[in-house]
Image (tube, rainbow, N blue to C red):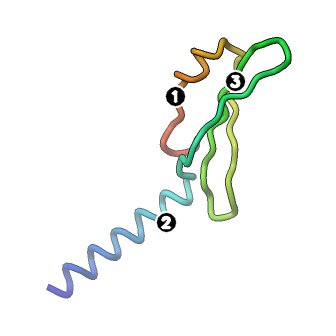
Amino acid sequence: MKIGWALFALVLIGMIGYGLNRGVYVGSEVFSDMDGRFRKQCKYLFPGGVTRKISGAWIIRAEAQDEFCRLFHD
């Protein structure tokens, strides 16, 4: 039984390490320029802090809110 828990703990630590190495999605926000165009900014957690990834195109607000952020950073 102790081997089962040890293996579970080892797998869990490995998954957490993998996730932090890749960058885990922690949130997003929509921001605009002065002309009323919007972009979505996805935030990812790394061991060194939070990194932001900004969408490539300026779009209308409704589309920016619906834009998808990946679970792991590229």
Up the image or down, 73 lies above or below 54; here it is below
Q: Position of residue 30 (x, y in %)?
A: 66, 29
Depth-wise, is mark 2 or mark 3 nearer the camera?
Answer: 3
Q: SS class of the residue under badge 2?
A: helix
- Which quarter of the picture shows residue 63? top right
Kindly identify which residue carries mark 1: 68
Kindly identify which residue carries mark 2: 17
Name the residue: 61% across, 21% down.
64
Kindly identify which residue carries mark 3: 39
Name the residue type under label 1. Phe
Can you say which quadrant of the picture contains the C terminus? top right
Name the residue: 32% across, 76% down.
9
Furthest residue toward left: 1
Name the residue type under label 3. Arg
Q: SS class of the residue under badge 3?
A: strand
Q: Where is residue 58 in the image (x, y as percent from the top left)?
A: 72, 16
Q: Position of residue 42 (x, y in %)?
A: 62, 38
Q: Are marks 1 and 3 in contact (CB under 8 Å)?
A: no
Other-residue count near label 3 (Cα within 10 Å), few / some / many at <14 / 14–19 / ≥20: many
Name the residue: 73% across, 28% down.
31
Q: Position of residue 60 (x, y in %)?
A: 66, 12
